[in-house]
Image (tube, rainbow, N blue to C red):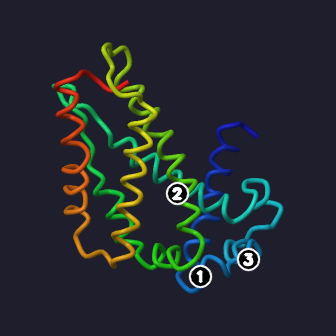
Amino acid sequence: MPEETSDRRSQRTCDLLLQALLELMDSKTYDLINVQDIVQHANVGRSTFYAHFQNKDDLLIHGFDALLEQVSQQITLDELGGLQFNPAMLFQHASGHYELYRTLIWGSGLGLLVKDGQSRFSQKVEERLAVLLHGKQNLAIPLEIFSTTFSGSLLVMLKWWLDHKMPYSPETMAVYFQQMLLENVNRMLENHGEIR
C-alpha cells in the first residue's frame, strides 16, 4: 500500500477515535470513559486503537495537540515586526464545545491538558516564533521564557473563563489577552530589540 494512502487511512482512524471520545463525553465524564467504550463507539478493534494510541489520555492529548498547532499558527508579525496574535479561535472552539470542556473540568481531563498541553503549546509557540524571527539580531528575551509565559497565560485564562461559565464573549477574551500580554511585549520590543 502506498505510504500516502496509509497515512490518510491512519489519519481517518485517529479522527474517528477522537470523534468517538468527544461524543461519549457528551453523556458521561471523562474519568468514566474507557478504551473499550471508545472502540465500540467508533466501531474499530482494540488493536487498531493501540496501534495509534497508548491510552485514552494519549488520544485526548492528540486531539488537543492538533488544536494547539492551529492556534500557534495564528501567531504572525506585522510589517513593523510587531507580534500579532488573535486567540479568539481557541475561545470560540471552547464556546462551541462547552459541554466537552465542562466535562473535562469536572473530571481529570482538563488538568491533564493544562499540565501537558501547556508544555506542548509552549513548544509549538517557540517553534513558530523561531521561524518568524529567524536571523534577527539583538534579541532581548530568551525565546523559551516568552513561549512558556505566553502559552501558560493563555491556557490559564481559558480555564478561568470556562470555570466561570464564559462570562465574556470569545472576542472579548481575545482582546483582554492581547491587552495584557501582546501590547506589553511589543512595547518592550520597540525599546529593547526582538525576542530570541
State which mark lies toward you, 3 or 2: 2
Residue bearing the label numbered 1:
29
Which secondary structure, mark 3?
helix
Of the numbered discs in the image, which one, if any, rests on residue 40?
3
- Asked if the residue at tag 1 contacts the one at tag 2, i.e. Cβ–Cβ closer than 8 Å, the answer is no
Drawn side of residue 105 relative to residue 14, left or right: left
In this view, the residue in front, 84 or 157, is: 157
Q: Position of residue 128 (x, y in %)?
A: 41, 33
Task: Identify the image quadrant of residue 35.
Answer: bottom right
Of the numbered discs in the image, which one, if any, rests on residue 64?
2
Of the numbered discs in the image, which one, if any, rests on residue 151?
none
Give the residue drawn at x 60%, y 64%.
18
Which secondary structure, mark 1?
loop
Q: Residues within 10 Å of mark 3 (few under 14, many from 20)?
A: few
Give the residue drawn at x 59%, y 57%.
61
**Which is more N-terminal, label 3 or label 1?**
1
| Distance of label 1 from label 3 (alpha carbons) | 17 Å
Q: Residues within 10 Å of mark 2 (few under 14, many from 20)?
A: some
| Distance of label 2 from label 1 (alpha carbons) | 17 Å
Drawn side of residue 91 relative to residue 118, left or right: left
Q: Position of residue 27 (x, y in %)?
A: 56, 86
Q: Residues within 10 Å of mark 1 (few under 14, many from 20)?
A: some
Drawn side of residue 62 relative to residue 54, left or right: left
Q: Amino acid at mark 1?
A: Thr
Looking at the image, the residue that sits furthest to the right is 47
Give the residue drawn at x 38%, y 72%.
162
In this view, the residue in front, 68 or 117, is: 117
In this view, the residue in front, 40 or 190, is: 190
